[in-house]
Structures are given as C-alpha cells and as structure tokens.
Image: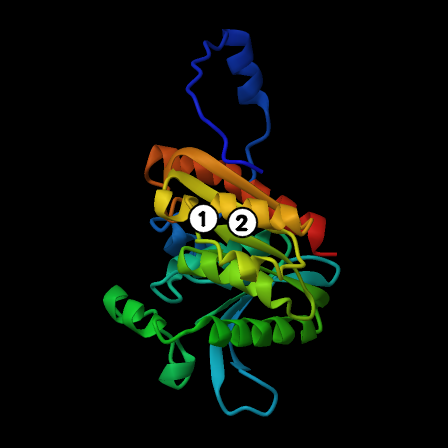
C-alpha cells in the first residue's frame, strides 16, 4: 500500500446527525497515552504479574516480563509488546493491559533486563536506557522475543500462536522479528518503526501492519521500499499514515492529531491480530 495523500474536509453536521451520533454506544477503549497509563493500571481489573523468562532452555539468563491476562472463557492468543528505546515503562505496561482487555495474553518483556541481572529498567533515566539499548543487537532481540513467545504459548491459558507489536525502537524490532520467522509467530504490527533492509524484508513470511505519523519522515522514508519488497515476494504489508501525527503518537495522545491517529490505529491493530492470530 502506498503512502496516501491527505487533505482537510470540513463538514457541517445537522442537529439530527449530531443527535444520532450522540445516541450511538461509546467507542471501545484504546491503549492509554502516557498521561493516562498509571491510572489505567491502577484501576485495571485484569490479573497481571511479573515473570522471569529464560533466554533459552536451560539458560541461567532471564528476561523480566510483565504478563497480563484477559478475562475470557477460551485460550487466548499471545501478543508480545516490544518497548520503545526507553525500555519497559509504565506506559508500555498500560498498552499491554489494553491488549489484554481486547482478549490477548499480553507479555511486555524488558529487553534491557538480561544485562542487569533481571532488574527492570523502569527506574532508569531515559538517557541511561538509551545507552543500554545499543547493546541489544537484532540477533539478541530476536532470540529474546522468540523466548518470550515460546513462554507465552506454553502457558496453560494460551493458544499456540503469537504476534508482536512494537513502538519506536520496538516498532523496528517488531519488523525485524517478522524477518526472523520464529515458530508460532503469525503476525506483526509496527508502530512508527523504520523498516529493515530490502534483503531482510525479502525473508518475511508473516503479515505485517505498519502504522505511522505523517510528520515522521525519518521513518516514513523507509515505507516505499518495504512496500515494494513485500509486493515482490507476494507478502502482506499494509501501511497507514495518519495526517498531522508525529513520531510516538500513541504515547503522546495529549496532542489532537496524535489522539486522532491513535483512535484509528488501535482498532486497526486489534483487527489485524484478530484476522491473523488463529
């Protein structure tokens, strides 16, 4: 899918139409912005817990991860939530909670915790986390995310499939994990993350959804190559660019264009997982 052009349409709503819209049921909840995440976590009725996940069978190295369970009757698919460049934050845990509200076992690993003896990075400064994340190579990231996926699929309440969604640095990681083609991985969602090289994208075998802000050309310049490469291998890649939104729009929902983008992007995310995590 090509990057769409955008325009502004002003519509005058009649009183009857406004009344009809007001009578409609409220829209479903979406993932919180950074300002709402703490309150969302505090009020969540869902069971959540910390888990220590071995990086490989028999390994002494462990990944700290936040696991949230949905309130459902049947086994649920797993979604691995890959954090931003700042490490695992309360905001990312809030995103995981909303994924669980939408019916998924959501697991948000702290990919910086392995090098810190399993200690989480939510108490680090952003600069410290950014420095640590330079040590997380694509190979290390893929091995850790695959380990988290295996852990999730082995849970008694889990279906034997998983998807990946990531944000910023994690968005790039999500696309890279699609390249990795780990067993059980069925779908990826990329939020404002740069695309891998064409030679890497050519290895992708799972459907990938890319969600981007219009005002993020550093990232968006990599979309056409991903589109053409996925088309050449007859892969499934859908990209959506939201007018006026910037990088990190799901986190920064206090800005109107970012909020509008988030209201559209979250249902797209859930729809993607519902379609492919079977």
In three-dimensional space, the C-alpha distance between marks 2 and 1, rounded to whole angstroms, equals 7 Å
Mark yes or no: residue 250 visible.
no
- Answer few, some or many: residues within 10 Å of disc 1's Cα (few below 14, many 20 plus, some between 14 and 19): some
197 or 11: nearer the viewer: 197
Instruction: Give the residue displayed 43% in from the left and 21% down from the top.
Output: 7
Q: Residue at x 58, y 57 (%)?
A: 100
Q: Where does the image place residue 30, in percent across and percent down from the top left?
A: 51, 44
Query: Circle 2 sits on which residue?
Result: 226
Classify residue 23 by image quadrant: top right
> Label 1's element?
loop
Dot 2, how many residues are within 10 Å of its Cα: few (below 14), some (14-19), or many (20+)? many
Q: Is residue 232 visible?
A: yes
Residue hosting label 1: 222
Find residue 192 and report its horizontal and vertical position in percent: 43, 49
Looking at the rendered image, the quarter that the N terminus falls into is: top right
Q: Which mark is residue 1?
A: none
Of residue 104 and residue 144, the one placed in the foreground of this image is: 144
| Residue at figure coordinates x 34%, y 71% from the top left | 134
Q: Are marks 2 and 1 in contact (CB under 8 Å)?
A: yes
Q: Position of residue 138 (x, y in %)?
A: 47, 70
Secondary-structure class at tag 2: helix
Q: Residue shown at 48%/88% (left/top)?
A: 61
Q: Nearer the viewer, residue 67 or 256?
A: 256
Q: Is residue 174 above or below residue 275?
A: below
């Amino acid at each position: 899918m090509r990057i769409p052009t955008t325009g502004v349409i002003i519509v005058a709503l009649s009183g009857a139409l406004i009344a009809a819209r007001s009578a409609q049921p409220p829209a479903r909840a979406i993932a919180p912005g950074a300002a709402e995440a703490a309150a969302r976590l505090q009020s969540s009725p869902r069971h959540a817990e910390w888990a220590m996940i071995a990086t490989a069978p028999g390994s002494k190295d462990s990944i700290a991860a936040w696991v949230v369970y949905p309130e459902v009757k049947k086994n649920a698919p797993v979604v691995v939530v890959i954090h931003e460049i700042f490490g695992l934050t309360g905001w990312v845990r809030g995103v995981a909670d909303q994924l669980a509200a939408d019916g998924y076992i959501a697991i948000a690993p702290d990919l910086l915790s392995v090098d810190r003896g399993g200690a989480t990075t939510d108490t680090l400064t952003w600069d410290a986390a950014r420095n640590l994340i330079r040590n997380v190579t694509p190979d290390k990231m893929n091995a850790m995310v695959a380990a988290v996926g295996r852990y999730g699929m082995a849970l008694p309440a889990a279906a034997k499939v998983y998807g990946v969604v990531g944000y910023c640095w994690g968005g790039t990681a999500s696309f890279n994990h699609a390249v990795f083609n780990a067993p059980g991985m069925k779908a990826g969602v990329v939020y404002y993350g740069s695309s891998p090289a064409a030679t890497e994208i050519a290895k992708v075998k799972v459907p990938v959804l890319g969600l981007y802000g219009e005002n993020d050309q550093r990232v968006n310049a990599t979309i056409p190559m991903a589109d053409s490469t996925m088309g050449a291998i007859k892969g499934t890649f859908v990209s959506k660019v939201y007018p006026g939104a910037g990088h990190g729009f799901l986190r920064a929902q206090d800005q109107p264009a970012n909020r509008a983008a988030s209201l559209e992007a979250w249902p797209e995310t859930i729809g993607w997982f519902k379609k492919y995590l079977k």
